[in-house]
Image (cartoon, rainbow, N blue to C red):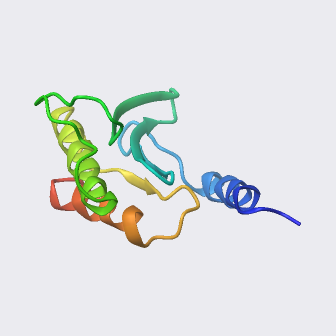
């Protein structure tokens, strides 16, 4: 009997065969834990993380703790932050990798916030 994480890992490998980030279209991957949400933009051709954003309990650049608010509000904020970081680096188009999570809830909120702040995928 497989547990939920084993199933997600198997699905993740299956998805990653089809999706990869390039120089022109890096991969935007989202990871969701029970408490936090993380987003990274990765160029798989050279194996380098170009930008990252999360809602970990640390002070942001504006000096505001990002753990305030509900998890859905923080997911929207992470989507906005990753989009701003990409626009700053002149990255407009990305490939979205939902990391074997269902495209609902916080995963969808990150994607929608990134789209509304200038990313295309």
Figure quadrant of residue 52: top left
Residue positioned 31% across, 65% down in the render: 109
- In depth, the one of 72 and 90 nearer the eye is 72
Along the horizontal axis of the image, is 106 left or right of 117?
right
User: In which quadrant will I find the C terminus?
Assistant: bottom left
Residue positioned 20% across, 50% down in the render: 80
User: In which quadrant will I find the N terminus?
Assistant: bottom right
23 is higher (above) or lower (below) than 98: above
- In depth, the one of 46 and 78 nearer the eye is 78
Along the horizontal axis of the image, is 79 left or right of 45?
left
**Which residue lies most toward the left here?**
62
Along the horizontal axis of the image, is 20 left or right of 72?
right
Q: Position of residue 86 (x, y in %)?
A: 24, 39
Figure quadrant of residue 55: top left
Residue positioned 46% across, 70% down in the render: 103
25 is higher (above) or lower (below) than 61: below
């Amino acid at each position: 009997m497989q547990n939920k994480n084993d199933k997600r890992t198997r699905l993740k490998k299956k998805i990653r065969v089809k999706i990869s980030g390039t120089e022109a279209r890096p991969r935007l991957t989202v990871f969701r834990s029970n408490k936090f949400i993380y987003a990274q933009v990765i160029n798989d051709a050279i194996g380098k993380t170009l930008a990252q954003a999360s809602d970990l309990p640390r002070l942001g650049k504006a000096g505001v703790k990002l753990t305030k608010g509900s998890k859905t509000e923080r997911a929207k904020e992470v989507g906005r932050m990753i989009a701003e970081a990409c626009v700053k680096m002149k990255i407009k188009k990305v490939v979205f990798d939902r990391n074997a999570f269902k495209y609902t809830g916080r995963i969808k909120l990150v994607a929608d916030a990134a789209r509304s702040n200038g990313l295309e995928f």
